[in-house]
Image (cartoon, rainbow, N blue to C red):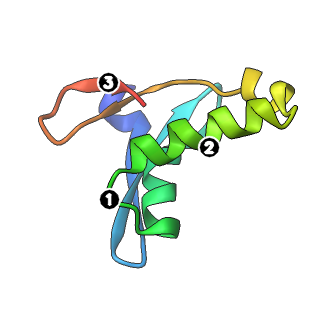
Amino acid sequence: MTKSDLIRVAVFEGKHIRKIMHLAEWWFSVIDILEVLTDSNITKRYWSDLKRKLSKEGYSQLYDKIVQLKFAAADGKYYSM
């Protein structure tokens, strides 16, 4: 099975949400989901601020379980998201 077999794109309300098979489960890009839900123009900044806020509010266990996987970007290269 190749890397491209493990990566798919889901469409929600006309927007693409990247997903990847990891440890026999589908994992989704939080950045893409936030873009759909918030209509934010700067989704990475929104996610960064949200993680900081969760940490300050005592949700460190949740923050510790965040995993960065490499997803394909528009240029075809794989970057941690």
Left or right: where does residue 61 sit relative to residue 42? right
User: Residue 23, how many percent across, how many down?
Assistant: 64, 25
- Say which of 69 and 41 sits in front: 41
Query: What element does badge 3 sit on?
Result: strand
Report whether residue 77 is seen.
yes
User: Residue 74, how many percent across, how many down?
Assistant: 17, 42
Q: Are marks 1 and 2 in contact (CB under 8 Å)?
A: no
Q: Disc 3 marks which residue?
A: 79
Q: Disc 2 marks which residue?
A: 50
Q: Nearer the viewer, mark 1 or mark 3?
A: 1
Report whether residue 27 is seen.
no
Quadrant of the rendering where the N terminus is positioned: top left
Q: Are marks 1 and 3 in contact (CB under 8 Å)?
A: no
Q: Residue at x 76, y 30 (%)?
A: 55
Q: Nearer the viewer, mark 3 or mark 2?
A: 2
State whether residue 77 is above or below residue 48. above
Label disc, if present, on residue 32 of the rendered structure: none
Label disc, if present, on residue 41 of the rendered structure: 1
Question: Could you tell me how far apart the alpha carbons at marks 1 and 2 are, in whole angstroms?
Answer: 15 Å
For disc 2, the neighbor class at 10 Å (few under 14, some 14 to 19, many from 20) is few
Query: What element does badge 2 sit on?
Result: helix
For disc 3, the neighbor class at 10 Å (few under 14, some 14 to 19, many from 20) is few
Q: Residue 40 occupies which quadrant of the picture?
A: bottom left
Q: Residue at x 61, y 24 (%)?
A: 67
State whether residue 31 is above or below residue 33. above
